[in-house]
Image: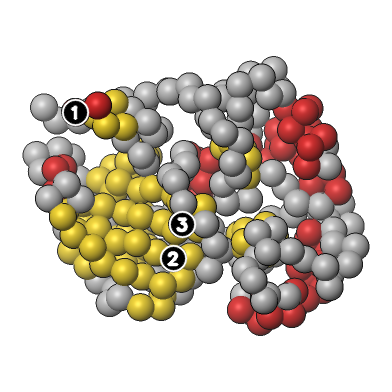
Amino acid sequence: MRQLRALIVVVLLAASGSAATGGYTVRWGDTLSGIAKRFGVAPSSIANANGIKNADRIIAGSVLVVPQGKGGTTPSGAPASGVFHVVKAGENVASIARRFKTTPAAIVAANGLSDPNRIREGQRLVIPGQQWLCPVRAGSAPMTPVHNYLAPRPGGRKHMGNDIFAPAGTAVVAPVGGVLRHVSGKTAGNAFYLAGDDGTTYYGAHLSSYVAAPGRVSAGTVIGRVGATGNAEGMDPHLHFEVHPNGGAAVDPWPLLSRAC
């Protein structure tokens, strides 16, 4: 049976409260004001960053983007924007600035850092001026992201990503810079892993073909083409897309895709 593009499955999940890329996974009993207090930001900042119209209706298992800095703003009062980077052992503000071709002062301002010499491993920093890209570059072609994370699959499995439907051959691009690896299998077909410079590993499957060779790629590099390989054969062409913060368990990609695609 062909998968319907309009299918949107909403699943409530009692999660452990782990953070996604620059975000927080909502747990049962959480409130927007409670999350805001925990991260030292204004509730309105989190609501605005995630398009939340009703602060009393946040869903357990959903991943909220949490703005950095006091009140989620830079000292100038402008909302902090950019991609997020997870600080690795041995890194400092200067080395991170060199990697992303920005300045230490810009990172300090975007994150409201009181002491730039005291960042810690695992800390999430917003990198200003950087943009997280939609992994499908559809242009004028129709493109439909579907929020079907944790939808049931045969054999008791769960769908660990979101699907982005687009015509066969549509470009699949790197959402951030990083190191690309090709993989393939009976289920995935032609697939890839991207170890992002932001500390998150991204996974995509069912490509019709590869374009970029394995190795370092920049944000926006065409990785491959949308297809229906693996167990997607017979379905509408689409990219199965997963997000793995710190290379760990998958989290819902929707907060990223709904903003970028």
| CA gap, disc 3 and disc 1 | 25 Å
Structural crowding at the residue carrying mark 2, measured as other residues with C-alpha within 10 Å and reported as few (<14), some (14–19) or many (≥20): many
Tag 3 or tag 2, which sits nearer the N-term?
2
Mark 1 element type: helix
Structural crowding at the residue carrying mark 1, measured as other residues with C-alpha within 10 Å and reported as few (<14), some (14–19) or many (≥20): few
Mark 3 element type: loop
Left or right: 37, with 10 as reference point: right
Left or right: 108, with 161 as reference point: right
Check disc 1 and give the amino acid type. Answer: Pro
Structural crowding at the residue carrying mark 3, measured as other residues with C-alpha within 10 Å and reported as few (<14), some (14–19) or many (≥20): some
| CA gap, disc 2 and disc 3 | 8 Å
Q: Position of residue 183 (x, y in %)?
A: 23, 63
Check disc 3 and give the amino acid type. Answer: Gly
According to the image, label 3 marks what residue? 247
Quadrant housing residue 66 = top right
Tag 1 or tag 2, which sits nearer the N-term?
1
According to the image, label 2 marks what residue? 195
Q: Position of residue 194 (x, y in %)?
A: 39, 64
| CB within 8 Å, label 2 to label 3 | yes
Q: Position of residue 21 (x, y in %)?
A: 57, 51
According to the image, label 1 marks what residue? 154
Quadrant housing residue 118 = bottom right
* Residue 168 shows in the view: no
* Residue 242 shows in the view: yes
Residue shown at the point (52%, 25%) measured from the top left = 14
Left or right: 97, with 246 as reference point: right
| CA gap, disc 2 and disc 1 | 29 Å
Q: Position of residue 161 (x, y in %)?
A: 37, 41
